[in-house]
């Protein structure tokens, strides 16, 4: 059993995922535990799969296709869910394909699991974090988070950072119940975790915006719609 499973959702990430996988290769040379990598693609139309395959001789890597062309609000949540449920590690990490948060930062997270936490997640908006981002996107992100705190998750400063680690038990349980397919899935996960009395720890990270994103502007609006749907969903349970 690997110590850490790394799940990476990828849609047309041929220009960026190579840097992320190379970073993981270098990281594996510095740590004394086993790592498996699961790349979950959704019918990509570029060469993402071919790029990933070139790393198969350096990493324990698996490619999964979620085989779904579209879903309301996108399919990132569904992709991460499929990867998480296939993972075999003691700890389950999902991270974005653009390497906005380098995997080496996971080393600062282990101490919080030793303290008894079940979910440890990166945050761009708490003291100690360093964010490198176009100013208007930063303002928009902070405004959206105020709405999330007011509506669903008071006290959590950043629900949407794509760098979250779960114990195997917590991850399997939470993702087995996940209903949000799109970009707002992080909010549902954290709301479910809190309602299930898992211990959560928000940790400052270094986050760098990377160009050539495949995320369209409409994703912001659909995520807000998902926020209210999630509040209704969790409130019923």
Image (cartoon, helix red, strand yellow):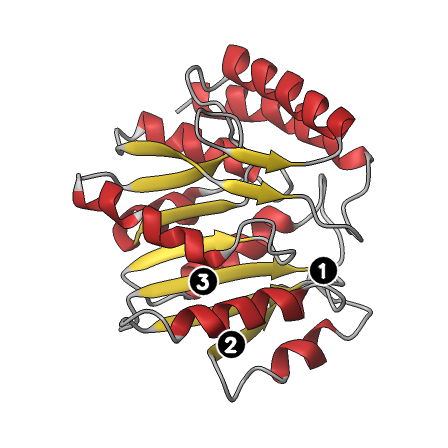
* Residue at left offset 60%, top offset 20%: 228
- Answer yes or no: do the residues labelled 1 and 3 have beta carbons within 8 Å? no
Coordinates of residue 164 in the picture (x, y in percent): 44, 45
Question: In the depicted view, which residue is nearer to us: 78 or 201?
Answer: 201
Badge number at residue 159: none
- Answer yes or no: do the residues labelled 1 and 2 have beta carbons within 8 Å? no
Question: In the depicted view, which residue is nearer to us: 34 or 22?
Answer: 22
Coordinates of residue 45 in the picture (x, y in percent): 82, 69
Dot 2 alpha-carbon crowd within 10 angstroms: few under 14, some 14 to 19, many 20 or more: some
- Answer yes or no: do the residues labelled 2 and 3 have beta carbons within 8 Å? no
Which residue position holds label 1?
11
Element under label 3?
strand
Task: Classify 125 as above or below 209.
Answer: above
Q: CA distance from mark 1 to mark 3?
A: 16 Å
Task: Classify 74 as above or below 236.
Answer: below
Which residue position holds label 2?
62
Q: Nearer the viewer, mark 1 or mark 3?
A: 3
- Considering every residue shown, the one lying at the far bottom of the view is 57
Dot 3 alpha-carbon crowd within 10 angstroms: few under 14, some 14 to 19, many 20 or more: many
Q: CA distance from mark 1 to mark 2?
A: 16 Å
* Residue at left offset 72%, top offset 40%: 72
Element under label 2?
strand
Coordinates of residue 1 in the picture (x, y in percent): 26, 73
Q: Earlier in the sequence, mark 1 or mark 2?
A: 1
* Residue at left offset 77%, top offset 75%: 47
Q: Earlier in the sequence, mark 1 or mark 3?
A: 3
Which residue position holds label 3?
6
Quarter of the image where the C terminus is located: top left
Coordinates of residue 121 in the picture (x, y in percent): 41, 39
* Residue at left offset 31%, top offset 32%: 200
């Amino acid at each position: 059993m690997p110590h850490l499973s790394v799940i990476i959702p990828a849609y047309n990430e041929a220009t960026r995922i190579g840097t992320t996988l190379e970073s993981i290769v270098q990281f594996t040379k510095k740590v004394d535990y086993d790592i498996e990598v699961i790349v979950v693609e959704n019918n990509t139309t570029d060469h993402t799969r071919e790029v990933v395959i070139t790393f198969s001789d350096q990493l324990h890597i698996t490619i999964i296709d979620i085989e779904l062309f579209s879903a309301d609000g996108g399919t990132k949540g569904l992709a991460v869910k499929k990867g998480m449920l296939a993972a075999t590690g003691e700890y389950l990490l999902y991270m974005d394909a653009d390497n906005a948060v380098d995997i080496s930062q996971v080393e600062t997270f282990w101490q919080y699991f030793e303290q008894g936490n079940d979910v440890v997640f990166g945050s761009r908006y708490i003291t100690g974090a360093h964010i490198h981002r176009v100013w208007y996107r930063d303002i928009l992100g902070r405004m959206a988070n105020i709405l999330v705190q007011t509506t669903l998750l008071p006290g959590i400063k950043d629900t949407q950072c794509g760098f979250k680690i779960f114990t195997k038990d917590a991850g399997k349980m939470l993702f087995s119940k996940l209903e949000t397919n799109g970009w707002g899935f992080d909010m549902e996960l954290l709301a479910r975790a809190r309602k299930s009395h898992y211990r959560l720890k928000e940790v400052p990270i270094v986050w760098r915006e990377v160009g050539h994103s495949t995320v369209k502007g409409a994703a912001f609006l659909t995520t807000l719609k998902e926020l209210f749907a999630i509040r209704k969903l969790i409130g019923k349970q």
